[in-house]
Amino acid sequence: MSLMKSRSEITREITREITRRAERGGLIIRGDIAGPYEDLFGDQPVNGRSINVSDLIVSFTRKFLGDFAGLLAARRKFLLRVAAGKARYGFTPPGSVVEDADGTRRTAAQIRRGMIDHFLGRNTPHRWSLNPATPVAPEIVRPGLQGTGPFDDLGMAMGAVNTGATGATSWMADWEDAGNDKADKLYRAWRNLKELLAGTWDARVYHHPDKNKDYSIRVGRPEWPVIFHRVPGIHLRNRQMALARADSGDAGIPAMIPALIIHTLNNFDAQKNRDSGIYFYVPKIETPAEAPLVARLLASLEETIGVPRGTIKIEMLNERARYAANQELIMWVLRDWLVGPNVGRWDYINSRIEMLKDRPAGVFPDPHTVGMTDPSMTEYTRRNALLTALVGGFPIGGMSAVMKSPRAPRDVNEKAVRSIWFDKLRERLTGLMVIDGKSCDLYRQSWVATTEEEYVRAGSEPLQAPPDGLQALADRLTGEERSKLSALGLLDRSGRPSPAIVSVKDLDPGRLYSRQSWARLFRRPTGPITERGLRYAIYMSSEYMFQQLNGNNAAAIDDYLSGTRLMNDFATYEIFWHWLWTALHHQSRLTERGEITKKGDRVTRKLIEYLLDERDEAVRYYFANQDRDGIRSRFDRQLAPVTMAILRRQLLHPRWIMYGSRVLLSIIESPDSERDRILDGIFSVSRTGNRVGNAAEYVYDIFPAGRKTKKRKGTRPHVTRA
């Protein structure tokens, strides 16, 4: 028997020792992360201080865990009350009190009046604006595209940096909807980001071992897109860490906490040395009661590293209906840090499906027919810009998901390139306003999810064009494109850009927060409910779920309706499966004849199960063809039947699941026997909220007795509308 230890044995011993040390300090880090990524968790030099990442994660978790639990419980309670007819969505009443992170209180009416007073230049006691103490760096607000995607693949991360040469002025590295959370991918992404920002890969070539391709950074630092880090929403837990507690077992760590801390402590000095900063994207905040948690986290982080209030800047995703209803109140709470909110299109559509889920007449039309040219989406886009402009902020546009496909004919890919050009021109025109006589050009940045050069150039052009160049762009519109923009009021009869006219009377809170404004913003889109839409939604849901369980959250899926590809993440997946659930739950009537249905037929369990079986068969046929042709898939095909089984259980389950992502994340690395047990626990939960397992508690935001939610002294719970 050899006394020599293998490399793998030595590695296991090291990771076990690191895990033991972490446990003694209160933080349990999974062994495959603790050892290989020890450098991310240790002492970091930050602004002349030495701060331990693990210790700060423990400190913040102990300090804020109860806040996360309380806010998630409040979300769950609100949805249950809406379903029971005891609460409803709406603008926050004028007399409701909102409190910021410092304990300052204002009524909704005072905040709204102060917002308007700022724009009109009135010096009143409640006047306020964004970033009053620490201004926004000019690098953040350069016109151009904001790219987004995961960073675990170093070659793709280098490609993201290189988009600075083709019109991307900002890039959001994603640790949430498109962040690949399997094995060590999130931590690989953090290391890639750290090395790129530190200059480790400047003037070096990275040879990709899987793609057999060389990558390098081809742009100088002045051309780099500004780096933002998208943190997970408050609804997500970190899967690789836990907080050891003697009283009630190990506690899950809100994923937002390590994301904020790892990026800030590892990269603050590198960014400061290059005259840049630490910038975050914050997703899925819904109410002004949730916003103070983000503010306290940012303020505590700034205090820890010894920088003034507002040094760290954030942009937010206006991607939930309740955020849109409370935008000005949330902006007020986060006024020291917020650059501006973006148009989070897909999660926003998903949240509107959720908003109407309890009304049979509220079931959305086929989701693929609801686009940004729907009047309610134009109202949402314009309102996001208007309210942000009133307080001196910088609004950002939304994601264009249509992509080129390497397998598509040239004319189809040209259509994809044209689609992003049109999308960004539409958004730029939507941001043209004359507010009380002042001309405003508000949408100068917008999102894209690919590094493909032709595509990025096409999307950048409308955003970077000078104001006097917009007419030349409008002159290049086709007749169909011009008709769409004219119908939205973005072009006049002569085809000239037509800014929205906003008078002082239009700014009166009585109008901004009227029933008419609510109807324009949240009316159900018109459109069909069809067998074709059901089949397409099952296809898109299952395609995404399969890729996600294989560790790919940013999934380019072939769109068989258009021939292009669509970039999907958790947001689009939630749209499709939630819509299917509502159509089945209310047994909606089909509005057109289908292959196996007639106009007027109901969406029944029998129909959904038939379409699921049909999809099952299509998947088996696809893999059989791959076997026949000798094609080796990069994905684990054994997860295909698992995917279909989960989708079937989700759709047939009687209870609303707010985030299907949490179901998938609960089982993504589980062995078969454990996976089945977890799923049985999730889908056997009764409507009374009986305690089941940790996964079910996570999925349904159930916090058993003993894990107390936290209510801060001196705050009033925000239990009003929306």
Image (cartoon, rainbow, N blue to C red):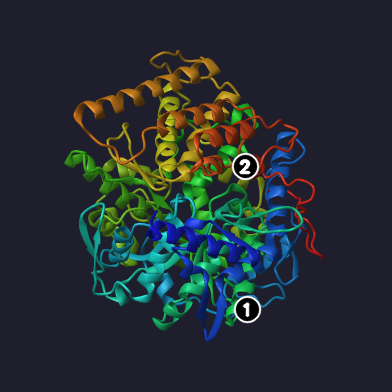
Q: Is residue 72 left or right of residue 404?
A: right
Q: Please, is residue 307 above or below residue 175 in the view?
A: below
Where residue 555 sits: x, y (%)?
A: 37, 44
Rendered image quadrant of residue 167: bottom left
Image point 57% across, 25% down: which residue? Answer: 652
Contact (Cβ within 8 Å) of mark 1 with mark 2: no
Image point 20% across, 54% down: which residue? Answer: 212
What's the distance in space between the residues labelled 1 and 2, CA to CA?
A: 34 Å
Q: Please, is residue 516 above or below residue 710 in the view?
A: above
The amino acid beneath tag 2 is: Ala
Q: Please, is residue 67 above or below residue 692 in the view?
A: below
Residue 335 seen in render: no
Task: Identify the residue position indicated by label 1 in the image.
Answer: 303
Q: How many marks?
A: 2
Q: Residue furthest right?
A: 714
Task: Identify the residue position indicated by label 2 in the image.
Answer: 695
Where residue 262 sits: x, y (%)?
A: 51, 68
Q: Is residue 208 left or right of residue 356?
A: left
The amino acid beneath tag 1 is: Glu
- Answer with mark 1 or mark 2, whichever residue precedes in sequence: 1
Q: Nearer the viewer, mark 1 or mark 2?
A: 2
